[in-house]
Image: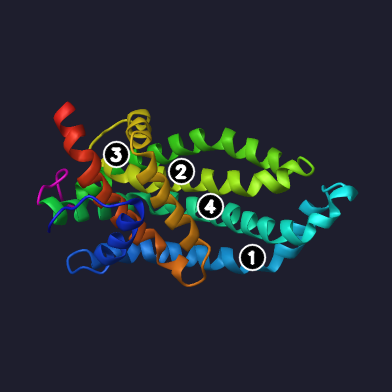
Amino acid sequence: MALTKRSGFGYFLFGVKLAVTPGVRRFVILPLFTNILLIGTALYYVFSHMNQWIEGLMSYIPDFLSWLSYILWPLLSLSVLFVSMYFFSSLANIIASPFNGLLAEKVEKLLDGESVQDEGFLAFMKDIPRAFAREWKKICYTTPKTIGLFILLLIPGVGQTIGPVAWFLFTSWMLAIQYCDYSFDNHKVNFNQMRLQLKQRQGCAYTFGMMVAIFTTIPLFNLLIMPAAVCGATAMWVTEFKPNTIKSG
């Protein structure tokens, strides 16, 4: 399959196409099932409690800024959606991480014809502990920033205006890390090196993450987002990062 440099938007759309490609579809089933189960449950829970959460956040706005409520309500609604979907999609990714790594491996082989590692069930089982350990590293990287952003949302006035934008950018960056990392991890590239390489392609990484973040909040589309994002991020790895990584290694 021809490899072409794309924007972050382009890699995401290409990932949707890859996810339904013969030879890849069967490796999509388990990540897809995990995502449908968790995100479907999350959507029901979020929409059942959204008004209550937003009213709680609005209570932090000083009376002299109450006239901003018509502007802040939709912004806070988006913040609640992004925060909730990020949390539940992260949980789904932790559970499905071994299968997402396998999917990334198969997509990479489809794109450039090279096998990442030894194939077979035993090789897959051997990599499961490493996959979960990698997810723990992401949690350790994310948690302090998440706490800081939650505190920002609680600051009267400032949190309700700047907070939604900060959350969207943070979510976009973390989703780029989340999905790109499967291919980096398959090649034993350490977590810090992976982040540095993504920073060298921030525009591409952020726009890819933005697409994932937006579609994660859209009902029905968000049920299919995990395998499509893995496929798109793998295409980004093969085209943007793999040549330099393998050469430098």
Please tell me whether mark 3 or mark 2 is closer to you in this view.
2
Q: Which amino acid does label 4 sit on?
A: Tyr
Q: Quadrant of residue 19?
A: bottom left
Q: Which amino acid does label 2 sit on?
A: Trp
> Residue 55: image x %, image y %?
79, 58
Distance between the alpha carbons at the discs numbered 1 and 4:
14 Å
Which of the numbered marks, if any, corresponds to residue 185? 3
Labels 3 and 2: the sequence-earlier one: 2
Assign a secondary structure to mark 2: helix
Q: Do the residues labelled 1 and 3 touch (CB within 8 Å)?
A: no
Which of the numbered marks, if any, corresponds to residue 45? 1
* Up-down relation of residue 171 to residue 229 (above or below): above
Q: Mark 4 points at which residue?
A: 86
Q: Do the residues labelled 1 and 2 touch (CB within 8 Å)?
A: no
Distance between the alpha carbons at the discs numbered 3 and 4:
21 Å
Residue 112 among those drawn in magenta: no
Q: Which amino acid does label 3 sit on?
A: Asp
> Residue 31: image x %, image y %?
36, 60
- Residue under the image location 39 percent in, 59 percent down: 226
16 horizontally vs 86: left or right: left
Distance between the alpha carbons at the discs numbered 1 and 3:
33 Å
Q: Residue furthest bottom?
A: 220
